[in-house]
Image: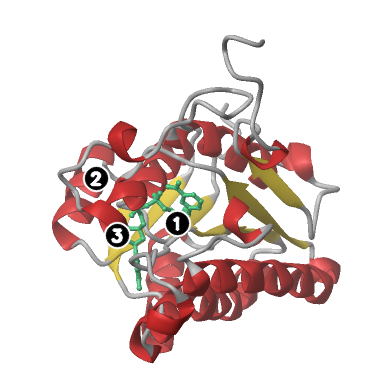
Amino acid sequence: MHRFDNQTVLVTGGTGGQGSSHVRAFHAEGANVIIGGTDAGRGTAIADELGSRARFIRFDVTDENSWSSAVATAEEAFGAVDVLVNNAGVQNPPALIEDTDEVTWSRILRTNLTGTFLGVKAVAPALRRAGGGVIVNIASTMSMGGTALYAPYVASKWAVRGLTRTAALELGRDHIRVNTIHPGVIATRFINEPAVGATAAIADFYSPEPFAVPRLGEPADVTRLLLFLTSAEASFITGAEYVIDGGLLLGPALAAETA
Ligand SMILES: NC(=O)c1ccc[n+]([C@@H]2O[C@H](COP(=O)([O-])OP(=O)(O)OC[C@H]3O[C@@H](n4cnc5c(N)ncnc54)[C@H](O)[C@@H]3O)[C@@H](O)[C@H]2O)c1
């Protein structure tokens, strides 16, 4: 008996650093998993590795028609959808607002915000058909303040907070809970690639030394919180926001020599 036996979980960006961790953990906990993503090679490899309770569906979260067919495919394969994790996201290359072109602005907003909106819109009816369910939207600690050079990303993730709270109000009576997770700095290619390229080590680019817990987050840290929020143990939690950042938002911790 596992926590997610007989449930079907759709994770967007399911081939990414955090997404693939989520997919594997839900699967290990008994769920059928739908790996949503644009990387067919990696998605198919993960699905093949996991076996009959896993499917890769190639789709871009910004495409409304693809969302409809992903939901139809999931229901056809497994009978229902019970959990949606809106995890797909993109970061902008660092630039001042004055140097940010409208194409970059729109690309980031379209994936992070519109993609999340389309996910809620497409999957809510399926969750209702299943008798209820859970949506978790992945935002960021960068949606709790300002971050110079990252205006498109910050704005997109702030907006996800408002979308989440509104969805929680609209869907609560249908037994659908909607919550947000705000990861801090998690060790995936997301951290270094947009700024300094994939070949730079994350540790060279970002030091966790000032955090109260002085390490980078791992995808598994976020996964454990996600599994709690989507489980029956969290049945009274909706419209809530969970920061998981090792204390990053608290401000700088004491330097080692003064601690
Ligand atoms: N890594 C961090 O430090 C960090 C911190 C806070 C929030 N986040 C958020 O966590 C989520 C997961 O990021 P990650 O760290 O695993 O990075 P990642 O780059 O490894 O994964 C992101 C995934 O999203 C997918 N994706 C991007 N655009 C897409 C689209 N239009 N349609 C479908 N899939 C798309 C990518 O292909 C990739 O698989 C993102 O929403 C990100 O904003 C990350």
Label 1 amino acid?
Val
Classify the position of the N terminus by image quarter: top right
Query: Which label was assigned to residue 28?
Result: none
Residue 164 located left or right of residue 42: right
Residue in view at x 44 percent, y 37 percent: 219
Q: Secondary structure at mark 3?
A: helix
- Count of number-bearing discs: 3
Numbered disc in front, either 1 or 3: 3
Q: Which residue is labeled 2 in the image?
A: 46
Label 2 amino acid?
Ile
| Label 2 or label 3, whichever comes before in sequence order | 2
Residue in view at x 34 percent, y 43 percent: 188
Q: Which residue is labeled 3 in the image?
A: 194
Classify the position of the C terminus by image quarter: top right
Q: Secondary structure at mark 1?
A: strand
Q: Foreground residue, 161 or 97?
A: 97
| Label 2 or label 1, whichever comes before in sequence order | 1
Q: Which quarter is ligand 1 in?
A: bottom left
Estimate the spatial distance between the alpha carbons at disc 1 and disc 3, rounded to whole Å: 22 Å
Label 3 amino acid?
Pro
Q: Which residue is labeled 1 in the image?
A: 11
Q: Foreground residue, 204 or 140?
A: 204
Residue in view at x 19 percent, y 54 percent: 44
Residue 160, image x, y percentages: 63, 70
